[in-house]
Amino acid sequence: MVFISLNQLYIDIRQLALKLPAFDIIAGVPRSGVIAAGILSSHLNLPLAAVDRANGLIIFQGGVRDAPPAGKNILVLEDSAHSAFFTTWINEFLPGYNVKTAAIYVEEQIKYRLDYWGKICPQPRTFSWGFMNCDLLKTACVDMDGVLCVNPTNHQNDDGPRYKDFLINTLQIYRPLRRPIHSIVSSRMEKHRSLTEAWLKNHNVSYNHLILTNYLSASDRQKDNRYAELKAEYYKSVDCGWFVESDSRQAKRIAELTGKPVICSETLESYNMVAI
């Protein structure tokens, strides 16, 4: 599995920029294409736009350094293209413009449908700017606290009324709405299953399995100190292709124990991923 960080995206955009002729406008395809377009337009010091299928071309007016477009040469950019579908409709929204298309990451069979492309990036792949809202969540194990919601503070983590209030009212971080998560794998205890399930339902998080621990108290769990080991045991037992863990030490340990791909959501580091 390939994982691309924002730092890698920036590096690859700079390399793509070396291949490009002069343009007057850089336009992104919402949503993630606008991320790539924003980086490229800043790098080239060009106006930034988006091509919206309801409203056509939207040219953004920003700070005092921004200047209006000086011409009609426009590059329409996606972060990745596995079907290049955007090339089938963009021209009807850009009458009067000289339109070229590009994507930073493409599959081999798609590059011929684009005017410019950055790197060949095979499937499966996911990106640091969208890994919690992609189709591959159906094959993922995902930590709960620190990924789907914030971690409890030391004050909240009393295994009593304050922790119960945390379980009910903790804030959501990621909102995975596209596909059900294969398994949510948490160090939370079974005695808190009903409150955990209620929170997930209230926040529209869909999943197939919720894996909790069988400790009787938080002190027992802390003494045993097998957070990563228990998560790794489950991860090895199922046909899942990647694990999202919030704690960097646990993420590294899970990767070591399983030899399978792991992403740390806190640092956006990845382990056992394929490099391109």
Image: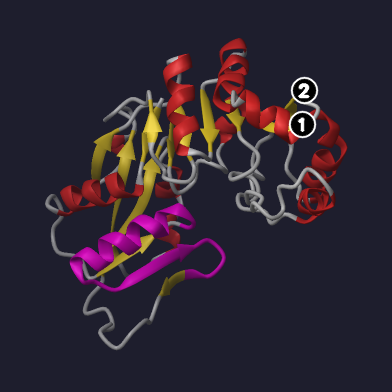
Q: Any magenta on residue 46?
A: yes
- In the drawing, what numbered circle is on residue 189? 1
Q: Going from the N terminus, do you reach mark 1 or mark 2 first?
A: 1
Q: Kindly identify which residue carries mark 2.
A: 214
Find out whether the residues at labels 1 and 2 contact each other: C-beta distance under 8 Å: yes
**Where's residue 258, x and y in %?**
48, 15
Evaluate whether residue 14 shows in this view. Answer: yes
Residue under the point 28% across and 44% down: 8
Q: Amino acid at mark 2?
A: Asn
Quarter location, residue 143: top right
- In the drawing, what numbered circle is on residue 43? none
**Where's residue 7, x and y in %?**
29, 49
Looking at the picture, does residue 165 appear above or below residue 105?
Answer: below
Quarter location, residue 71: bottom left
The secondary structure type at the circle numbered 1 is: strand
Q: Please report the bounds of the magenta region as a residue range.
A: 30-56
Image check: 27 left or right of 177? left
